[in-house]
Amino acid sequence: MYSWGPLVEKIHRAVLFKELRIAVTFPRPGGLPGPIRSGIPLTLRNVNDFVPEKQKMDQGIDELRKLGFILSSQGKLTASMKCTKEAFERAFNTELKQFRLDTKENYSFYSFYLPAKRAPWRPLPILQGLIDGAHIQWPHIYMAPVPSVKPPKVNYYHLNVPKGVVDRLNATQLHAKGVTGKDIRVAMIDSGFAHESHPFFAANGYKSTVFLAGDAVDKTKDLLGHGTGESANFFSIAPHADFIGIKIASDDLAEMLNASPASMLDGFITARNQNPHIISISIASDLRDPKSTEQCSQLREDLIAVQAEILHAVGSGITVVAAAGNGQFGFPGMMPDVISVGGVYVAQKDKMQASDWASAFESKIYPGRHVPDVCGLVGLKRDRYIMLPVQPGCIMDLLVSAGDQTKSDDGWAAFSGTSAAAPQVAGVCALLKAQNPGLTPSDTKAVLRRTAKSVKRGHSNKDSSDDGRTPLPAAGLGEDGATGAGLVDAFRAWKQV
């Protein structure tokens, strides 16, 4: 089994252990003591003797409800209810203290409340004769493998989240100052966001709200795993922003292979309806002539509506960040008013080079538009670069495990691409917006560009050239090379807003 140990200090300090789960028992017919107070061991032979009178049981539950208890489920003999620490103490005139469990076991949680030693136990008069016992339920143990908060150890160079991303985008000093994106609403459009299925997110205090676009279903699942993993890039940079996940993918494999429950337009409209400050897009359309390798010179008609929505959003003050592509002529990243994000590989000892996995090109649809504007962190082509948390057993978990030394169901996968870089840069935008709420989309792009770190080595993905063989070099073209203005520097940008 995998240990959830680090959860104990992060997750349940404020909320989970304060919502108590209470097992309630009731007196036997005729007012006789029930299974708790009678002291009689329950057996198959005598259990029916302890079935309470239905009217008395309902009356007891009703009185607890009046005291702030909530019914979760009602059985033949007992009821499971939940309440706050304060409600429990008032109802039974007792004192509770925090109790911690051994983190070597896979409990569903590790910190909760139990009555203090020698604490009084005096139920309110209204409960006497109606309640036999009310006991705080301990968390259960998961007996099947669960994902670990920490990534597995592998024997190749890679980055871990959040630290690896934070350090290389120079956001460490900002976090130390308390600059974490608080109160900035950021919507991210992607496959899904299974944050509840992986302890990494809760252990780091990351919170999210998920909305379903189009016909997408189940806010808690992410069969592909892409959105869940890439969102960790955003949280690494802006851990306290108001994250809004927009799910667009299916959780049915057959359906995923044949159709999508939501289009890019569905996703963007749903994102816009949440009134965000920033929208991050890690999906794209490849505007390549299907009859050749060359870039299209006109926008496809099916994308005009998306273009219109994005333009209206940017005109309304919403900053839109989009992936440049991994060898594609990526749209909407090529739109001039969008912040287009390419890729830089930062190796050991902080040596930088353009990622040959990321796109870079001159747009034929928007004359004078160079892609990308700036860059985030992206591995080299086919490289396993950033270890990311995913829904255990999802497609990314299964596919990537063949080469990243992780297991196919451990909830960790190493991948990158400009899908990772876009939410990283969106996170930096959130830090800037938190510092200066009046910052416009064009202001944001300008400050990111003028403070980015210049990259002089490497080249772009050759597939993002018309002949499929001639990538853009990083150096020699000023800000028009493989990395645009360069690698985003969060601290330098923050100092200028």
Image (tube, rainbow, N blue to C red):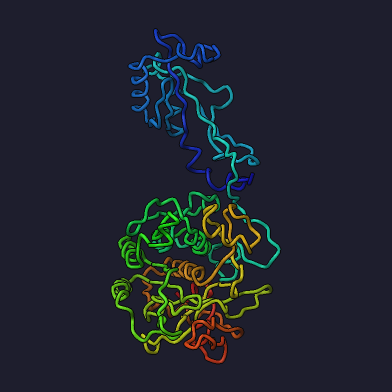
Residue visible at 57% across and 39% down? 142
Q: Residue furthest right?
A: 155
Q: How many marks do you count on the picture?
A: 0
Q: Residue furthest bottom?
A: 476
What is the quadrant of the N terminus in the image? top right
Q: Is residue 161 visible?
A: no
Looking at the picture, how far across and down is residue 328, in whole percent?
Answer: 46, 78
Q: Is residue 155 above or below residue 197?
A: below
Q: Quadrant of residue 473?
A: bottom right
Looking at the picture, how far across and down is residue 238, in whole percent?
Answer: 49, 63
Q: Is residue 101 visible?
A: yes
- Name the one closer to the observer, 389 or 489: 389
Q: Is residue 95 above or below residue 333?
A: above
Residue visible at 38% across and 68% down? 437
Looking at the picture, how far across and down is residue 35, in whole percent?
Answer: 49, 15
What is the quadrant of the C terminus in the image? bottom left
